[in-house]
Amino acid sequence: MPQFNENMRGAAYMVLAMLTFVLNDALMKTVSPDIGLFQAVFLRGILATTVLGLLTWRSHGFATARGKPNKYLVLRTIGEVGAGIFFLTALFNMEFANAAAIMQAMPLVVTLGAALVLRETVGWRRYSAITIGLMGVIIIIRPGSDGFNIFSLSALAAVFFLMLRDLATRGIPRDMSSNFISLVSSIAVMTVGGIVTLFGDWQPVSALTLSKLTGSALFLMVGYFYSIQAMRFGEVSFTSPFRYTSLIWSILMGYLIFGDIPDVPMIIGSIIVVGSGLFTLYRERKVKLSKARQIKAASP
């Protein structure tokens, strides 16, 4: 019963994390008619970096980063920057739920990357699920249709940058503060946004736009907090599937805020991607349990 309660608590945290991440994305998309992408990224970055800097300082996170720069932290930061820029580019120019649906392929791509790069064992069942899931992505983006454009590929590029981010994270020392890691990513994204903004036209920022960016930054911070809490409470194999609730929130926000109504191919593709991802998570859990039993049986 205690483990069940911890699992349910972790699941609730994951659902809240996905909701706040989607609210962050929705607010960012609402400012797209008023200011450019990189100006929005820069302004939000100032707010997010300030909060993360304070959190890192209060938690003594800077002390965990002494020594030489970590190459995995550098790779993770590149992944974070690439994912943020490519996803927001897609988000600013696509229907809200469609961009979010493509991002649901991330767990599948991470599993594939772990097999190819980290040489983790992946059986034919999970390879089959990955293949089917990527077919679902193709259904969503529909190459050759009127809805397919460069921004569909931008969302797909964001998925692969997220794979780089997650795989690189595994190489970062565990004693390095999560707040510090997030702060480095936030500074990098903010810096890229600021540099690109220097070469473009700076748009006037209204009080309403600034309030939206502030809300976006706050939702982003809350999402970080609850996603970390979700991993600390409950089993990862139990809480991870609840990441897919982000698609539900995205469809709801897309309809309520932007008036987007998902079409049949998007719904079918999303079901395929989510179903494949859930099966992959199920297989990963089953393989881990089998290995644990073998180790226990072999121990004296």
Image: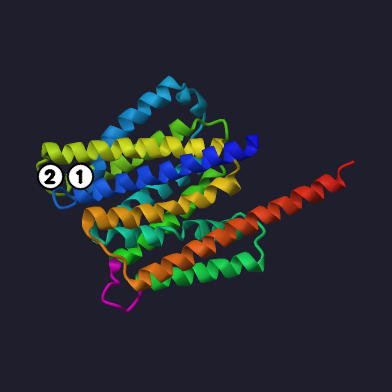
Residue 248 pos. (x, y %)? 39, 55
The reply, left or right, for residue 160 in relation to residue 28 is: right
Q: Residue at x 50, y 35 (%)?
A: 229
Quarter of the figure that contains the C terminus:
top right
Tell me, yes or no, whether the highlighted magenta stretch contains residue 75. no
Q: Main secondary structure of the magenta part?
A: loop
Q: Report x, y in % for residue 8.
A: 55, 41
Q: Please say if 231 is above or below 245.
A: above
What colouring method underlies this structural image?
rainbow
> Over which residues does the magenta segment extend?
142-150
- Given residues 176 and 143, the one toward you in this image is 143
What kind of residue is marked 1? Answer: Gln
Q: Give 193 or 11, whichever is nearer the viewer.
A: 11
Residue at numbered disc 2: 202
Please name the residue shown 15% across and 49% down the image. 200
Question: Residue pushed farthest right?
Answer: 300
Give the position of the N terminus as an image quadrant. top right
User: 72 or 167, which is in the foreground?
Assistant: 167
Q: Determine if residue 157 is in view.
A: no
Nearest to the observer: residue 107 or residue 74: 107
The amino acid at mark 2 is Trp
Residue lying at 57% horizontally and 30% vertically, measured from the top left: 175
Measured as percent of width and height from the top left, residue 21 is found at 36, 45
Cβ–Cβ under 8 Å for marks 1 and 2 = yes
Tell me if 215 is positioned left or right of 104 in this view: left
Q: Describe residue 58's horizontal placement relative to residue 154 as left or right.
A: right
Callout 1 environment at 10 Å: few (<14), some (14 to 19), or many (20+)? many
Q: CA distance from mark 1 to mark 2?
A: 7 Å
Reading the image, the residue beneath label 1 is 39
Looking at the picture, does residue 77 appear above or below residue 104? Answer: above
Q: Is residue 50 visible?
A: yes
